[in-house]
Each structure stands twice: as C-alpha cells, then as structure tokens.
Image (cartoon, rainbow, N blue to C red):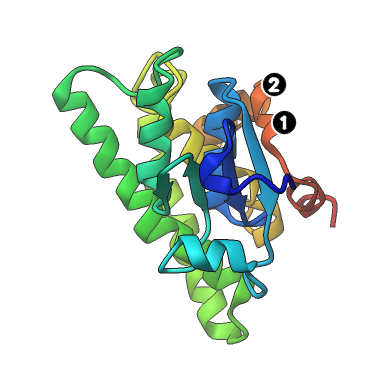
C-alpha cells in the first residue's frame, strides 16, 4: 500500500473481508460500475491500525474516499451508485426505490446473519436452524423470480448484487435448493454468468465452492 495517507489518496480504498457477503457486494457493485478502487483484504480477527483509527466501529467493509469514510455496506453501495450514476443500479421512481431499500435492509439484517451463523457458530443445533431458516426464506421467494430476469425488475440492481453474493455461498453453506426452486436456480445462474461477478470474487470466495 502507498505511504500516502488514505484520506489524501485520489483512488477509493476499500477495507474488505474476503469471505463476507457484505464486503463482497461492495466489491461487486464497484466492478459493475467500473469504479477505480484499491481493495485491502482484511482478516476480521486482526484489524489493521489504519482501519481502527478511521472507523469507530472497527467493522468491515469500510470505504475511504478522501475525507469521506463510510462503514455501512448499504450506505456504501448506494453512495457508489449515486456518485457513479452509469449504469444506474437503483430506480429513480421513489416507490420502486423504497421497495428496493427495504429488500436490501432485509437481506442485510435477516439473511446475511444466517450465513454468519452457519459459517462461524460452533453450536450444531443453531447452525441447523439457521440453514433451515435460510432455505425456507429463499423458497418463499420463488414466485418473485418466476416472471422477470432480475429481482422484480427487467434490469440488474443493487438488490441483485446483494442476492448474488448470498446465492454464490449456498453450496459452501450446505444448502441445496429443491427442484421446485428452478426459478431461483435460473436466476442465480444469470447472476453468476455476468463477467463482473467473476471479477468481484476474492481468492477465498473462489475456493468456497471447490471444497
């Protein structure tokens, strides 16, 4: 990394957990919008001093854009979409935008924590419950994916980016969707086939589904 202070650098810097869906979706949005960004991979159990000094919560992801420091993943991806408006990844219609923000919040606060439980929790029963809950939540969404190429939209959005990083992790989480979930499987394949998705993957994420 350059000796130039992070808040003085001309290129954005992202402190990223190479295994976290929250960090992954920021990297994916940056790739989709072709945003120049230095990505610093960080072990969440061994945070660098720079990050601790910049972010009072010492959390990941953390984005540094000169004097601006952001450390909420949803705030970060919306900021990136607004600062780099092409291609747009949020509707300009206030109703559609509100629905997207609500779905983004649900994914972040209800679905991603289930991933974390499955990956990190050592209690076998709690892992089993989290795996079941995540599977059921996805199955309940089958009708949503049956009629449009993307999530309730003809165009790729921030919601799709947030779902893509979760769907990528299903095999490593021990989750196999039933045949009745073909609409989700087809949707997932469309997301994974995007060139920018493959470019967004860290080495750890590439290895997830090879284990």
Residue in the picture at 37% in, 60% down: 110
Gap in Å between the C-alphas at discs 2 and 1? 6 Å
Q: Secondary structure at mark 1?
A: helix
Residue 36, image quadrant:
top right
Please give left or right for residue 85 compared with residue 211 in the image. Answer: left
**Disc number placed over residue 151 in the picture, else none:** none
Taking 189 as reference, is 75 above or below it?
below
Picture mark count: 2
Residue in the picture at 41% in, 42% down: 76
Residue in the picture at 42% in, 43% down: 67
**Disc number placed over residue 195 in the picture, else none:** 2
Number of other residues with Cα within 10 Å of mark 2, as a class: few under 14, some 14 to 19, many 20 or more:
few
Residue 162 appears anywhere in the view = yes
Counting from the top left corner in percent of width and height, residue 108 is at 39, 53
Q: Secondary structure at mark 2?
A: helix
Q: Quadrant of the C terminus?
A: bottom right
* Residue situated in front as seen by the camera: 124 or 9: 9
Residue in the picture at 35% in, 59% down: 109
* Residue situated in front as seen by the camera: 110 or 9: 9
* Residue situated in front as seen by the camera: 64 or 76: 64
Counting from the top left corner in percent of width and height, residue 87 is at 45, 13
**Disc number placed over residue 198 in the picture, else none:** 1
Counting from the top left corner in percent of width and height, residue 106 is at 32, 51
Counting from the top left corner in percent of width and height, residue 123 is at 58, 87
Dots 2 and 1: beta carbons under 8 Å?
A: yes
Number of other residues with Cα within 10 Å of mark 1, as a class: few under 14, some 14 to 19, many 20 or more:
some
Residue 199, image quadrant:
top right
Taking 159 as reference, is 14 above or below it?
below
């Amino acid at each position: 990394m350059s000796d130039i202070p992070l808040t003085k650098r001309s290129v954005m810097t992202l402190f990223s957990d190479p295994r976290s869906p929250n960090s992954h979706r920021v990297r994916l949005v940056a790739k989709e919008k072709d945003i120049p960004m230095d990505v610093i991979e960080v072990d969440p159990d061994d945070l660098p001093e720079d990050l601790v000094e910049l972010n009072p919560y010492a959390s990941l992801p953390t984005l540094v854009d000169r004097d601006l420091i952001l450390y909420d993943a949803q705030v970060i991806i919306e900021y990136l979409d607004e600062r780099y408006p092409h291609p747009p990844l949020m509707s300009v219609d206030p109703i559609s935008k509100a629905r997207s923000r609500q779905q983004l919040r649900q994914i972040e606060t209800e679905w991603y924590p289930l991933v974390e439980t499955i990956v990190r929790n050592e209690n076998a029963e709690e892992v089993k419950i989290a795996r079941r809950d995540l599977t059921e939540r996805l199955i309940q969404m089958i009708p949503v994916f049956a009629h449009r190429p993307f999530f309730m939209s003809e165009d790729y959005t921030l919601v799709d980016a947030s779902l893509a990083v979760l769907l990528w992790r299903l095999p490593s989480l021990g989750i196999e969707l039933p045949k009745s979930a073909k609409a989700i499987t087809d949707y997932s394949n469309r997301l994974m086939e995007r060139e920018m998705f493959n470019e967004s993957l860290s080495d750890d994420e590439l290895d997830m589904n090879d284990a």
